[in-house]
Amino acid sequence: MADTLDLGSSVPDVQVQVLSSAAYSLRLVNRAKVFFDTNGFKYVLALSCVLVAVGGILIHFAEGMELSDGLWWAFVTTTTVGYGDISPSTGAGRAIAIVLMITGIGLLGTLTSTITSFFLNLKAEKPTHRDEVLGLVLSQLEDLENLSNEDIDRICEILQTFKKE
């Protein structure tokens, strides 16, 4: 039984839970990073946030409303909710609204395609153990001239093992 690792008394349960939580959090952060990198979504999101802020400031001047109301209106317009509690009455205000509406539609479309691509790529990126081993075998076979007879026998054993599966 020397091969088994006994952590029972040497590592308290709290430390194991903290390490498990940290590992899970790190995986979550990495997945979020991959998600925001998919389809350049982080750039679309950043541009949309800038346009909401600029639109809120511009509508504040164009319509003479409070800055907080202008930012609220810009956010509501971009998310395509459009409560109607505040609406532009000037031509400049309506032009700003058009830009924000198109921004919102583009953001929602990009979000949808990013979610789809993220989950499709997530499934495609997980190679199986078999794929990894076969990849190693293939890389060894590319240098066939330098393989010893023992190496070739080992490769044959590996291939026969996979054939039985």
Image (cartoon, helix red, strand yellow):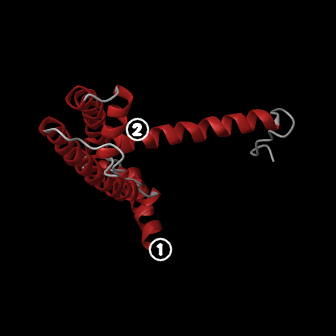
Q: Position of residue 151 (x, y in %)?
A: 39, 51
Q: Position of residue 91 (x, y in %)?
A: 12, 39
The one nearer the camera, 99 or 39, is 99
Q: Secondary structure at mark 2?
A: helix
Q: Give the Cα distance between marks 1 and 2.
A: 40 Å
Residue under label 1, please give it: 164
The one nearer the camera, 8 or 77, is 77
Q: Is residue 102 visible?
A: yes
Q: Position of residue 23 (x, y in %)?
A: 60, 38
Residue under label 2, please give it: 33
Q: Is residue 160 above or below residue 103?
A: below
Q: Is residue 149 visible?
A: no
Residue 24 falls in image quadrant: top right
Q: How many marks are shown on the rendered structure?
A: 2
Q: Residues within 10 Å of mark 1 (few under 14, many from 20)?
A: few
Residue 14 falls in image quadrant: top right
